Amino acid sequence: AIVLGIESSCDETSASVCIDGEIVSNIIANQTIHEQYGGVVPELASRVHQQNIIPAVHQAIAQAKINKKDIDAVAFTRGPGLLGSLLVGTSFAKAFALANEIPLIEVNHMQAHILAHFIPNQHEGNPNKKPEFPFLCLTVSGGHTQIVLVKDYFDMEVVGETLDDAAGEAFDKTAKILNLPYPGGPLIDKYAREGNPDKYKFPEPQISDLNFSFSGLKTSILYFIRDHVKENPNFVEENMADICASIQQRIVSILLNKFKKAAKLYNVKDVAIAGGVSANSGLRNALTELAQKQGWNVFIPKFEFCTDNAGMIAIAGYHKYLKQDFVGQDVAPLARMGM
Ligand code: ATP
Ligand code: MG
Ligand code: FE
């Protein structure tokens, strides 16, 4: 079966073609307009989606070397995300389904981040290697931080989550304190490679259960920088690498300490990470090391499938297609959408 996937939940417009479970194209149009505002401006995001969606779909179909008429179903992100952005992808998918007389498939964006692991050729060695149910996934993105017990493709339980900021927000907001442009996560990662992660000690919050908190860390970094800049106005510039390495190490340790606890509690052997922050090299390395010590089979997505992409929507859509799980033309997007 051939499934077209559409993603437009935030500021990436993306289209992908999945043929019998393989992703043969994954076109991602990034929006750069938000950089100058230091964050995604919802109103602007939906307008740019409106401009980019048709070209992205055309490219995805061309790269897949198929004809529009060969497509068996269209899958789209129903939520969670920015409503104006979601409306563009949803309306496109509905119109495409109607015009081509094919079924419509709704996809939950957070489930899709996890289901990206079922795209083949991602894990070193065996091209068909994939996690076995039940497994535990640490989903770390711009809007979410969740520990998810994945029992089946569409049977997922959130067993821990953030009480305030998401891990991606922790990266982006601290980057802002360091005067780095938006989104700052990848820049912290870049500077951290050259720095000493033990140079500065930032606090680890004491939160019960499997939940996370990042707002205290952000505040402590704000005060730390403010106090040092009083003594040396060039403190940030002079110590950028060490500051970034120390911040990154703390965010990673907060994430992995809870993840380790969860893996023990649920007694799983297969573990995975998903979402934009899973592109972080500090997290990837620390998780690989931890997995070796704990004897886990670890699944780390290819960079292309970490941040928002329609490949993950197309693979999720493909697995719903196999179950003939379709929705009607009256479907509407949901800014908030649970698992
Ligand atoms: P959600 O999936 O929760 O709706 P989103 O779709 O906006 O949120 P993603 O696209 O999955 O989020 O991830 C974007 C986030 O990932 C941003 O906060 C960005 O800074 C962060 N990020 C991307 N690459 C890295 C990196 N190498 N290191 C740290 N953070 C990163
Ligand atoms: Mg984005
Ligand atoms: Fe996302």
Image: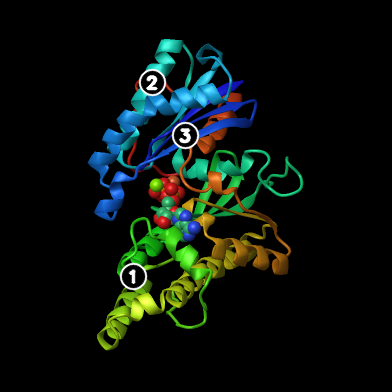
Which of label 2 and label 1 is nearer to you? 1
Mark 2 / mark 3, whichever is N-terminal: 2
Q: Residue 334 sits in which quadrant?
A: top left
Residue, disc 3? 107
Mark 1 / mark 3, whichever is N-terminal: 3
Residue at the spot 67% in from the left edge and 67% down from the top edge: 289
Query: As rendered, which of 290 and 246 lies closer to the eye?
Result: 246
Percent position (x, y) of residue 135? 63, 51
Which of label 1 and label 3 is nearer to you? 1
Percent position (x, y) of residue 205? 42, 75
Q: How is the image coloured?
A: rainbow
Percent position (x, y) of residue 183? 37, 55
Three-letter amino acid code at the position of disc 2: Lys
| Residue 141 visible from this viewpoint | no
- Measured in 3D between alpha carbons, the distance from the residue under mark 2 to the one under mark 1, in whole angstroms, is 43 Å
Residue, disc 1? 178
Residue, disc 2? 94
